[in-house]
Amino acid sequence: MNTNCLHPERSRTLAFLYLFIGGIAAWTLLMPWVPAITRASMRRFHLVTPSFALWAIAQPMPSMYSFANTFDVRTSSPVTDEMMVVDAAYAGVRHPDCLHREYVNHFPCQVVTFGEVRLGLCRPVEPRWVVTSSMYRGQRLIVVNEVTPAGNRFEVLRHEVDLP
């Protein structure tokens, strides 16, 4: 019996594995030049993908440590209801109502989901606004998380801000 030949099901499995690894490599290599891939990667970091399925598909992609990720915890809303535009004071300048600003390595939304700052968000009685931001090669994604205490937990309302 010839043991050097791959069985058909083993060949399909190996082909799928190579395609999967090739897809991840292509995604990673194209990200600096394809804005749609960059945007999708940033949206994954902020938990604002259009669907759970798209978020789940993007999970095997490597985390990009080259994003400039920041978050601010503020006492007033940086967003106007009519236009959803972040006020000009946020553009690199610490706003007077900013309680905490920090740079994070990756996944800036962890501040709201399970980061150390989360505990501080639960204590006050009034709402807080956590503004997370990622920048990469001229693209910027800003997400405003309105955090309202509700007993021992809090409710989060997310607003993705599209900048011109």
Image (cartoon, helix red, strand yellow):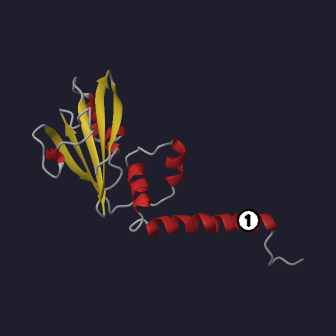
Reading the image, the residue beneath label 1 is: 12
Q: In this view, does 92 lie to the left or right of 140?
A: left
Q: Is residue 153 above or below residue 68?
A: above
Kind of residue indicated by mark 1: Arg
Q: In this view, does 92 lie to the left or right of 48?
A: left
Between 38 and 122, the one lying in front of the other is 38
Kindly identify the residue that appears in the image at 82 percent across and 76 percent down. Answer: 3
Give the image location of residue 33, x and y in percent: 40, 68
Kindly identify the residue that appears in the image at 19 percent across and 37 percent down. Answer: 74
Give the image location of residue 4, x and y in percent: 80, 78
Kindly identify the residue that appears in the image at 48 percent across and 59 percent down. Answer: 61
Between 21 and 89, the one lying in front of the other is 89
Query: To which quarter of the image does residue 77 belong?
Result: top left
Give the image location of residue 71, x and y in percent: 25, 46
Kindly identify the residue that appears in the image at 44 percent across and 60 percent down. Answer: 37
User: Can residue 79 be seen?
Assistant: yes
Q: How many labels does the image show?
A: 1
Query: To which quarter of the image does residue 114 belong?
Result: top left
